[in-house]
Amino acid sequence: MKIEKNERLVLIGDSVTDCGRARPIGERGGLGSGYPALLNAMLSSRHPELAIRVTNMGVSGNTVRDLKARWQSDVLDLQPAWVSVMIGINDVWRQFDCPLQPETHVLPEEYHATLEALVRQTMPHVKGLLLVTPVYMDTNRQDPMRARRDEYAAIVRDIAARTGAALADPQPAFDRHFSHCHPMSMSWDYVHPDLTGHMMIADAIYQALEA
């Protein structure tokens, strides 16, 4: 396990991370109903001797622009040893559900530059940083939004490779799952997973931290 005894892990992202977490800081019973709570349970049940402190700082609707605006208060000021960042699906989604509002669109160049800048800004202050690729629950790679999501996921992988950040990629687990059932069985909008999907994300993060 890369995280050591008594260290703090901050999870930051959008609604997939938020999941009704407590305000202003989501911890213990206030981790929400998604993957942060599941990951906390996995860490505490499998490594009780480490006493890892998990903090959920997800905010529904966020893009990477929003993360940049609150990075100091919601990440650096908390002085975590590790940071996990899962962001990008809203950056993609706004291009499709708000096509006439280009000011809300975070295009690939801005996404890449902003996320990489946050990673490089943070790395001197933490022991480790984990990037999680965004997930979209459509297995049709020709679908425009799935294709765009794949483009943003490739950006995440590129940043991880060039900065030395750890990487978790839950999308393959979702694609395997949907070879047995339709994505609609998990998510009406293909963006917000049910508890099974959140377990896939938690498992991908756990494996990345244990590798």
Image: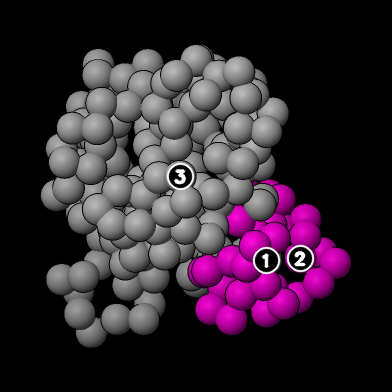
Residue under label 3: 28
Magenta residues, start to end: 169-198
Name the residue: 37% across, 16% down. 127
Residue closer to the observer: 19 or 164: 19
Name the spot of residue 211 as percent of width and height, x first.
64, 21
Q: How is the image coloured?
A: one colour
Name the spot of residue 36 as percent of width and height, x first.
51, 48
Identify the secondary structure beneath mark 3.
helix
Given contact means CB atoms under 8 Å apart, are the residues at marks 3 and 2 in contact?
no
Quadrant including the N terminus: top right
140 lies above or below 9: below
Q: Name the mark on residue 25.
A: none
Q: Earlier in the sequence, mark 1 or mark 3?
A: 3
Name the residue: 25% across, 37% down. 75
Q: Is residue 203 left or right of residue 84?
A: right
Residue under label 1: 139
Q: Quadrant of residue 78?
A: top left
Residue at mark 2 to residue at mark 1: CA–CA distance: 7 Å
Q: Name the mark on residue 178.
A: 2
Name the spot of residue 144 as percent of width and height, x first.
50, 71
Name the residue: 60% across, 48% down. 38
Residue closer to the observer: 154 or 189: 189
203 lies above or below 32: above
